[in-house]
Amino acid sequence: MTRILIAEDEARIVSFLEKGLSAQGYTTLAVNTGTDAVALARDDTFDLLILDLGLPGRDGRQVLRDIRSRGEKLPVIVLTARDGIDDTVGSLSEGADDYVTKPFRFEELLARVRLRLRDEQSPETTLLSVGGVSLDLRSRRATHETRTIDLTAREFALLESFMRHPGQVLSREQLLSHVWGYDFDPGSNVVDVYVRYLRQKLGGDVIQTVRGMGYRLIA
Ligand code: CA
C-alpha cells in the first residue's frame, strides 16, 4: 500500500487530488497547514508528500527545510504558482524532488508521482493494450489493429484515461479532471467533442456511450 500525504489549503484541489489518487489505488491523507505537514511527513508513515508552497502556518519551503533537516527522505513534489519561479527553484535546492505548476491536469501530477515512487514499486507500464488498441506511453504512439493513429496531445490523454480503466464507465466529470484539470468548467461539452474525435479515428464502436453516466471503453 502506497501512502501519500497531501499538504494543500485549497479545498477543491485537495478533493481533486484525493479522488484521483485513491482511484489509482493510493491511500491519501490531506492536511491544510504547514504545521500539520511537518508533524506528519515522516518516512515511516508516508511514501510521498505533495506539498503546496503557499500554505498557512509554515509555508511549503519552511516545511521542506524542517522535514529535510530532521532527516526525512520521502520524495516531495511541490505544487507551485505560475509566477512563483523563485520559490520553485528555491524549493528544489531545499530538497524537493519535483514540481508541478498550477493549474495542472491530473495525469500530469500522476506521472510525477509514479516517477518518484518507481524505485519502490514494480516498473511502470509503458504499453497499454485493450482490444485492438495499443498506446505506447513512452513514444506517445497509438495503434489500432496494425494501423498507426495520429492523436493530438489531448486525444492521447483522453484515450489513456479510458485505457487505464477498460470496461469501466467514466463520467464526464472524471474525464474532465483527468485530462483537462480542475480549472475546467464542469458544464463544458469538451469531453463529448473529444470522444467524437476519438471515435472518428478509432471507429465508432470502441467507446460506448452510457446514457446519463458517461463513457466506457469496450474491453
Ligand atoms: Ca495554497
Image: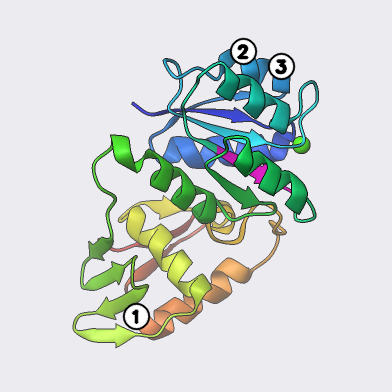
Q: What residue is shown at x 41% (from left), y 15% (from top)?
A: 44
Quadrant of res 65? top right
Q: Residue 150 location, x and y as percent?
A: 39, 85
Report the mark closest to the observer, 3 or 1: 3
Work out how far the residue at label 3 is from the one at label 1, CA to CA, in angstroms.
50 Å
Q: Which of pointers 3 and 1 lies earlier in the amino acid sequence?
A: 3
Residues tagged 2 and 1 counted as in contact (Cβ below 8 A): no
Residues tagged 2 and 3 counted as in contact (Cβ below 8 A): yes
Return the residue at label 2. 39
The amino acid type found where label 2 is placed reads: Ala
Q: Which mark is residue 35?
A: 3
4 displayed left or right of 55: left
The amino acid type found where label 1 is placed reads: Leu
Disc 3 secondary structure class: helix
Asked if ligand 1 lies within 8 A of label 2, the reply is no
The amino acid type found where label 3 is placed reads: Thr
Q: Residues within 10 Å of mark 1 (few under 14, many from 20)?
A: some
Report the mark closest to the observer, 2 or 1: 2
Disc 1 secondary structure class: helix
Q: Nearer the viewer, residue 141 or 200?
A: 141
Q: Quadrant of ligand 1?
A: top right
